[in-house]
Image (cartoon, rainbow, N blue to C red):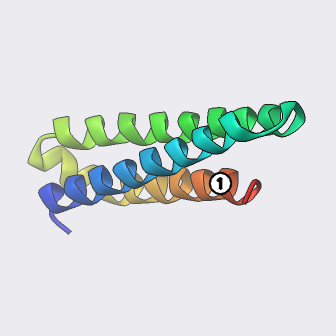
Amino acid sequence: MDRDAYVEKMKAQIEEWNAEIDKFQAKAKAANADAKMKYEEQIQEMRAQRDKAEEKLRETRDASEKAWDDMQKSMTAAWDSISDGFRNAMKRFQ
């Protein structure tokens, strides 16, 4: 996959995650105190994963074509790990 397509894919995924975070925030507002604390913990974890993804997006966007060629495999592995972390944080509370 070329870098521009990869960047667009990453941006779309981050937008989906932001929407999921917004849903959890709405649920937290409506929850009782105990559940609200659990939602907030999950939201913090989801934001942390999202922030890591945004950093990887910046690295990818800022890389030269030569650097992208060299880093593509490791970037894909890092992105997969971040995605797994986000999904795991989300699943724990659904």
Taking depth in this image into account, of 91 and 35 the one nearest to the observer is 35
> Which residue is drawn at the image coordinates 64% and 32% (left, top)?
44
Q: Would you place residue 52 above or below residue 9 in this image?
A: above
Instruction: Estimate the x, y position of residue 8 in percent, counting from the top left.
Output: 20, 56
Taking depth in this image into account, of 41 and 86 the one nearest to the observer is 41
Quadrant of the image occupied by residue 35: top right
Instruction: Estimate the x, y position of residue 7 in percent, counting from the top left.
Output: 22, 52
Question: In the shown orientation, is residue 62 left or right of residue 83?
Answer: left
Name of the residue lying farthest toward the front: 30
Question: In the shown orientation, is residue 68 left or right of residue 85?
Answer: left
Q: Residues within 10 Å of mark 1 (few under 14, many from 20)?
A: some
Q: Which image quarter holds the N terminus?
A: bottom left
> Which residue is drawn at the image coordinates 61% and 45% (left, top)?
24
Quadrant of the image occupied by residue 59: top left
Question: In the shown orientation, is residue 35 left or right of residue 61?
Answer: right
Q: Which image quarter holds the C terminus?
A: bottom right
Instruction: Estimate the x, y position of residue 92 in percent, counting from the top left.
Output: 76, 56
How many numbered callouts? Answer: 1
Q: Would you place residue 73 above or below residue 89 in this image?
A: below
Amino acid type, mark 1: Met
> Which residue is drawn at the image coordinates 25% and 43% (left, top)?
60
For numbered disc 1, what is the local secondary structure? Answer: helix
> Which residue is drawn at the image coordinates 64% and 37% (left, top)?
43
- Residue topped by disc 1: 90
